[in-house]
Image (cartoon, rainbow, N blue to C red):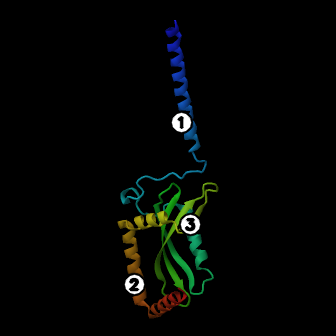
């Protein structure tokens, strides 16, 4: 008789221990979950074939970038304005983020010929307001690495090469511009 109730008792104890182990394991998993929002990473965005350079693709983003350059040009000592602004984008590593290449013609005060240039910005869409915001790199090594990666794509290199050729042509065509740029470079080097 003793053997008859011993087997069910062992079975109940084993099942209880197994159930307790599973409950403890679930509790540990719950503790590891973070409450901070996680940005969705875009897959394949580092590949040029999956992330082509797009011109003026996102009107709201383009407007934010153009406003940024208009503000940047107003009230500066040497720079009178940024004109003919064109916005080129590559998708950022995370949803709602973009690497932006901004092609412009910079007007230097008292110089007739405009200077073609190309700037790079990182822009993110604010999850709360939905507005685009220009972000600084703030020493973010991952961000710098990603921007360098997409900047090495052939479509971006082609844009850089075209802008450099336009810059050289503008400088070669105007001696006053060449002198003004030399003065700007010297002033910048003196500050650093």
Indicate the secondary structure of the residue bearing disc 1. helix
Q: Residue furthest top?
A: 1
The vertical placement of 183 against 119, above or below, is below
* Disc ID at residue 135: 3
Question: Which mark is in front, 1 or 3?
Answer: 1
Local crowd size for mark 2, using a 10 Å CA cut-off: few (<14), some (14–19), many (≥20): few
The residue to which callout 2 is attached is 168
The vertical placement of 77 against 135, above or below, is below
Q: Earlier in the sequence, mark 3 or mark 2?
A: 3
Q: Earlier in the sequence, mark 1 or mark 2?
A: 1
- Real-space Cα distance between discs 3 and 2? 30 Å
The vertical placement of 38 against 104, above or below, is above
Question: Which mark is in front, 3 or 2?
Answer: 3
Q: Could you tell me residue 95's position as x and y percent?
A: 51, 54
In front here: 189 or 84?
189
* Disc ID at residue 25: 1
């Amino acid at each position: 008789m003793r053997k008859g109730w011993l087997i069910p008792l062992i079975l109940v104890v084993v099942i209880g221990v197994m159930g307790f182990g599973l409950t403890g394991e679930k509790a540990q998993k719950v503790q590891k979950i973070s409450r901070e929002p996680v940005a969705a990473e875009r897959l394949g965005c580092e590949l040029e074939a999956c992330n082509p350079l797009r011109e003026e693709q996102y009107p709201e983003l383009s407007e934010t970038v153009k406003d940024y350059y208009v503000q940047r040009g107003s009230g500066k000592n040497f720079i009178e304005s940024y004109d003919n602004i064109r916005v080129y984008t590559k998708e950022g590593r995370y949803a709602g983020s973009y690497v932006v290449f901004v092609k412009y013609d910079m007007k230097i005060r008292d110089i007739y010929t405009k200077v073609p240039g190309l700037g790079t910005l990182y822009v993110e869409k604010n999850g709360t307001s939905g507005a685009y915001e220009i972000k600084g790199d703030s020493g973010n090594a991952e961000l710098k690495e990603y921007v360098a990666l997409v900047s090495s794509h052939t479509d971006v290199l082609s844009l850089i090469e075209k802008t450099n050729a336009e810059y050289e042509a503008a400088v070669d065509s105007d001696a006053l511009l060449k002198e003004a740029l030399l003065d700007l470079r010297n002033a910048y080097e003196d500050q650093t």
